[in-house]
Amino acid sequence: MVKVHKITASPYAANAYLVEAERPVLVDVGIDPDFALNAIKRVIDPNSLEYIILTHCHYDHTAGTAQLAEQTNASVAIHQCDADLLDDIHATASSLFGACPPSIKPDMLLQGEEILDLGDLTLKVIHTPGHTLGGICLHGEDIQRTSSLRLLFSGDTIFSNGGIGRTDLPGGDPTALMNSIKLLTTLDIDAIYPGHGEAVYKNVNIHIEKSLKFAELNMLNK
């Protein structure tokens, strides 16, 4: 059975998620690669990690990527639009952390609609711009359960309790974010794993609808 392990260095850090499938993947990394590596070691052999999938280019999600990829030999995937911005101190929000942009060389450039086969789990890449130009969500289905469990790794597109990603950084677009969240309302989802805060396991659709209303208000106020 597929298991999802949350990896967070501190309450204020971005969430990373180790997806323990037949072919394990890590969704985002965070700032501290050693913390992430040690967390992975407690669950699987790090050398079995198939992919590191970045939901967007912001520093708090990506800074540890290059070191962790080297330590695990995992392939790094990110949407093409954000891959083009990885050396931009403003687009990556690195300037907010007093740091240089992370040095990342992606192995896979995503466009959206790709299906990643992890053996007992499929992950569909959904392009959800608005927080950044190349933000993505991952819609996963555990195909070996008697009752399929559908997961959403939402990055900074939506959070629990109606939260949404900020749109005041380079590449942010309130209208695009609203349309991305509208797309998420059409999906079958049983659990949401956001880029910050707690996961959602109950009344998922209510949380997404709240996010949509917040995004609509945000757009009207711009």
Image (cartoon, rainbow, N blue to C red):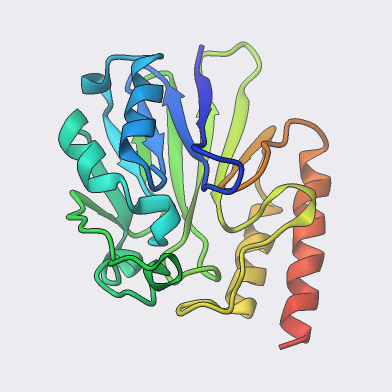
Q: Camera-side residue: 31 or 46?
A: 31
Q: Camera-side residue: 85 or 22?
A: 85
- Quick check: 96 left or right of 222? left
Label count reads: 0
Could you tell me if residue 204 is visible in this image?
A: yes
Residue in the picture at 66% in, 61% down: 181
Residue in the picture at 75% in, 52% down: 208
Q: Camera-side residue: 207 or 72?
A: 72
Quadrant of residue 118 in the image?
Answer: top left
x then y, percent, for residue 29: 38, 42
Quadrant of residue 75 in the image?
Answer: top left
- Check the image and name the residue furthest to the bottom: 222
Residue in the picture at 78% in, 55% down: 162
- Quick check: 179 left or right of 63? right
Could you tell me if residue 73 is visible in this image?
A: no
x then y, percent, for residue 198: 68, 38
x then y, percent, for residue 45: 27, 15
79 lies above or below 190 = below
x then y, percent, for residue 154: 57, 48
186 lies above or below 134 = above
Q: Quadrant of the C terminus?
A: bottom right
Quadrant of residue 56 in the image?
Answer: bottom left
105 lies above or below 19 = below
Residue in the picture at 21% in, 42% down: 67
- Quick check: 133 left or right of 73? right
